[in-house]
Image: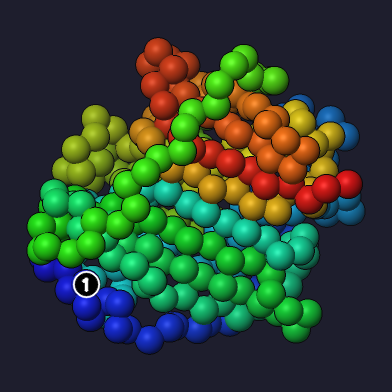
Amino acid sequence: MPLDAARALAAGPRTREISWTDRDVRLYHLALGAGVPATDPRELRYTLETRLQVLPGFATVAGGRPPGVIDALSVPGVDVDLARVLHGGQALTVHRPLPVAGTATATSRITAVHDKGTAAVLVLRTDAADAGGPLWTEEARIFVRGAGGWGGDRGPSARAEAPVGEPERTVERPVREDQALLYRLTGDANPLHADPDFARAAGFDRPILHGLCTYGMTLKAVVDTLLDGDAARVRSCAARFAGVVYPGETLRIRMWRPGPDTVRVAVGAVERGDAPVLAETTVGLARR
């Protein structure tokens, strides 16, 4: 199926009204593995409505809207097979702490299409605002296998250098066998994460975890480990999805603090020799 880069870039922005409640926030947190142990006061900040704070990663699912991978496929000029599509990376900036319930206007459009030769990369930008002003800005990078080779701009190729030295903290987080099934309830119903036949057609042995679930689990680990549980200090998070995670595996999350307002993170799959799953990951912080 073809990809018409010029048409995708020329397509106008799409605007929709989204809304959410504390129930949606709690479901998102549970889908990331929050609530263990269930009575731990640190976990109740994610699961109990009377103490609730919002992890910034919730912006990627707020309002039950389609995730970037699915949303991009409905843009004019993007007529590609879902089985050839992967989420390549995510960047998010929150302009202020997210409310536990709200209504906002989300506007999205394709801002770039890069020709990587054997593949194409789409960049989908979404801006959300409510009556109080801007809430968040996000960019999803969508990798479409077999859609390159038309002679377009290759886009940026430089990659951030890996952190050096011993990490300040290293934690491990188990991925439940049913975690992808639970995360799908936040709005990402891509069969790649549930249907074994679809996963095999896409080139995987079995269904894989959503990249945004790994992203959210990593943000939670940073908040809990380095920020004393204060999610409001996170202002941004950018990551490249360097590999897949299979439900049932364990994430090893290594964290460095190169400065007072920056955390660098690397995430690997323990059972596969620390195979990279999140790379070039930077979390920006608000200063105290």
Residue 18 lies, in percent from the top left, at 60, 76
Residue 128 lies, in percent from the top left, at 61, 74
Which residue is located at x 38 percent, y 86 percent? 12
Disc 1 residue crowd, few under 14, some 14–19, many 20+, Cα 10 Å = many
Which residue is disc 1 drawn over? 5
Instruction: Residue 213: tell me if it is visible.
Output: no
Give the amino acid type for the residue marked by disc 1 in the picture. Ala
Residue 257 lies, in percent from the top left, at 70, 30
Q: Where, quadrant-wise, is the N terminus in this rendering?
A: bottom left
Which residue is located at x 68 percent, y 31 percent? 258
Give left or right: position of 85 versus 30.
Answer: left
Compared with 277, 26 (above or below) is below
Which residue is located at x 37 percent, y 43 percent? 158
- Looking at the image, which is closer to me, 157 or 267? 157
- Give the total number of marks visible in the rendering: 1
Q: Residue furthest bottom?
A: 12
Which residue is located at x 67 percent, y 61 percent? 94
Quarter where residue 2 is shown: bottom left
Compared with 270, 119 (above or below) is below
Tag 1's secondary structure? Answer: helix
Residue 110 lies, in percent from the top left, at 37, 72
Give left or right: position of 255 versus 182.
Answer: right
Colouring of the image = rainbow
Give left or right: position of 108 versus 196.
Answer: right
Instruction: Residue 277: tell me if it is visible.
Output: yes
Quarter where residue 164 is shown: top right
- Looking at the image, which is closer to me, 57 or 117? 117
Compared with 187, 51 (above or below) is above
